[in-house]
Amino acid sequence: MITLHINGEPRQFEQVTSVAELIAAMGLTGKRIALERNGEIVPRSSFSSQPLTDGDKLEIVVAVGGG
Amino acid sequence: MNDNLIIAGKSYSSRLLVGTGKYKDFAETRAALDASGAEIVTVAIRRTNLGQNANEPNLLDAVPPSQFTYLPNTAGCYSADDAVRTLRLARELLDGHSLVKLEVLGDPQSLYPNVIETIAAAKTLVAEGFQVMVYTSDDPIVAKQLEDIGCVAIMPLASLIGSGMGILNPWNLQLVMERVSVPVIVDAGVGTASDAAIAMELGCDGVLMNTAIAAAQNPVLMASAMKQGVAAGRAAYLAGRMPKKLYSASPSSPTGGMIGKA
């Protein structure tokens, strides 16, 4: 069990070791998102290889209407 | 006549840039964009809603990046650091897209730009290869500094964001235009089509707006009005207006050939 701070909210996950697994657990696989881990961009091409550790701070963003 | 707007080496036939916020739904957003004729559209970058329905409508479906030039913005950022992080995320989100709108705000009441943070962010972003269109005050010295940093367009406010107050200081806009050689695009403050026309008549290279269209009673009709206002203002600027004078001793009709004269 690890705790990840996702978009400012603490969330607990079991058996999530990579960004790709987290994205899948959140139902976001294939969605147009961008992800930052502890202040650094994680490219989509690295989602499978990027490990996650307890306490990581993640930002997951999308494009929305704006001026 | 080719009178395209050139930004960072890319040519655009529309001088109206529009935002995609505040619309009733994505269908209205798309209809307004189409009526405006805009090619460059701003989008915001926000945290995904963690509890959301994965199949809820998506802006990118209604406004495909293949049909519009996306201009991701940093709306809501109050520090250079937040703005830079937001645009790094945007570049990743949009597959390496580097044309961005930088705005760093000073306070949540006025949404007036914080030019010190804006300059700091611009330096970082230009160094990282972004093509930065920058929202700023109508200060000509700051505008020149932003151009010297490498920004590809200077976008001074005409009045406060969302105020619809129109062009409050045409003289400062002219000073900005005199000092910088990259495109100057009025960003913020336009309320109706005549405001857009005035900005273009002054010689601005374009106008960026969101609320003026989205908050109109009929946004799609207003989008069309703005398209025409920008086009009319641009044509008037290119045509060169007659000088203003207090009165004219030269009527438009012939002075000779009047009836009833001896």
Image: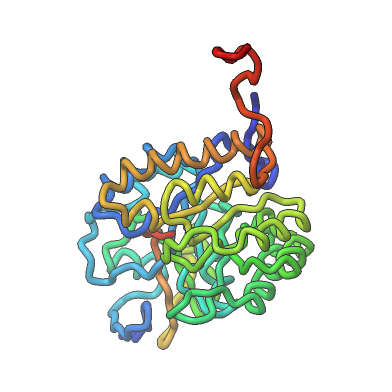
Q: Quadrant of residue A31?
A: bottom left
- The residue sitting at 42% across, 51% down in the picture is B192
Q: In this view, does B225 lie to the left or right of B90?
A: left
- The residue sitting at 49% across, 59% down in the picture is B166
**Which is more toward the observer, B257 or B153?**
B257
| B201 over B24 or under it: above or below | above
Residue B6 is situated, as x and y percent measured from the top left of the image, at 66, 41
Residue B81 is situated, as x and y percent measured from the top left of the image, at 58, 78
- Which residue occupies the extreme front position in the image? B262
Quadrant into which the N terminus of chain A falls = bottom left
Q: Is residue B166 left or right of residue B239?
A: left
| B65 over B123 or under it: above or below | above
Q: In this view, does B211 lie to the left or right of B71?
A: left
- The residue sitting at 53% across, 69% down in the picture is A41
Marks counted in the figure total: 0
Q: What is the image's colouring?
A: rainbow
- The residue sitting at 48% across, 72% down in the picture is A36
| B51 over B191 or under it: above or below | below
Residue B250 is situated, as x and y percent measured from the top left of the image, at 67, 30
Mark yes or no: residue B15 visible.
yes
**Which is more toward the observer, A39 or A43?**
A39
Mark yes or no: residue A42 visible.
no
Residue B36 is situated, as x and y percent measured from the top left of the image, at 41, 40
Quadrant into which the C terminus of chain A falls = bottom left
Q: In which quarter of the image is residue B154?
A: bottom right
